[in-house]
Every structure is written in C-alpha cells, then in structure tokens.
Image (cartoon, rainbow, N blue to C red):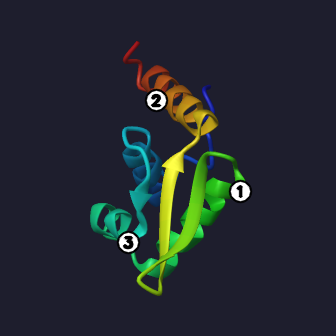
Amino acid sequence: MTKLNPILHQELRLSIISFLVNAEWVDFMKLIEVTQASKGNLSVQISKLQESGYIEVKKSFKRNYPHTECRATDAGKNEFENYLIQLKQLLNLE
C-alpha cells in the first residue's frame, strides 16, 4: 500500500503547500485569508514545513511592523508533486 507523506498529509499543511507551489513569495496574511487558519496554528504549521525543507520563510519589517513571507522550495514542490502521484495511485486514478 502506498504511504502518503505524513508532513503533507495534514489538512492545513496541505493547504499551505498547495497554494505556495503556484506562487512566488506569499504574505502571511494572504495565507491566513486563503486557509482560514488562526495566526497561531498557521505559524506552527509553517514552522513544520520549513523544518522539513518544503518552504522558505523570509521575515522583515514593513513600516515598523513584522512582515513574514513564504514560498515553496524546489524540494517542497517535488514532494507535493510526489504526494499527488501517490494519492492518485492510492485512489486508483492512474
């Protein structure tokens, strides 16, 4: 049986990476809007994706306020693509 990537096989992390693979740098507030997650939960899941090497996080200041942006790494894009392939195999769609 195909074993899905446990890092990506979680609803919020999957939502984050699926949005980031089709974008460049994405603002933290945009990710909140897209995922409807709380700031705390989103931060935790972003950290897990970053620790796994699937996303890159850039922190800066804009008008004296913290500003966080994220983007998918090449490894993250590859893992997401592999995840989709495995999911299709699991569902017998290929």
What's the residue at 41%, 83% (across, down)?
A: 63
Q: Amino acid at mark 2?
A: Leu
Per the image, the residue denoted by label 2 is 84
Q: Position of residue 2 (x, y in %)?
A: 60, 27
Q: Disc 3 vs disc 1: which is toward the camera?
A: 1
Query: Foreground residue, 55 or 25?
Result: 25
Could you tell me which quadrant the N terminus lies in?
A: top right
Residue under pointer 3 = 37
The answer to whether residue 9 of the structure is visible from this angle is no
Label 1: state its secondary structure. Answer: helix
What amino acid is found at the position of numbered circle 3 in the picture? Answer: Ala
Q: Kindly identify the residue that appears in the image at 61 percent across and 45 percent down.
A: 54
Badge 2 local density, few (<14 within 10 Å), some, or many (20+)? some
Q: Are marks 1 and 2 in contact (CB under 8 Å)?
A: no
Residue for badge 1: 51
What whole-number distance in Å separates the C-alpha atoms at marks 3 and 1? Answer: 20 Å
Of 71 and 45, nearer the camera is 71
Residue 87: percent from left, percent from top = 47, 30
Instruction: Between label 1 and label 2, give the one nearer the viewer.
Output: 1
* Residue at image point 47% right, 47% down: 17
Q: Give me the residue at 28% from left, 67% from top.
A: 33
- Taking 64 as reference, is 68 above or below it? above
Percent x, y of residue 21 = 44, 39
Q: Quick one: quadrant of the C terminus?
A: top left
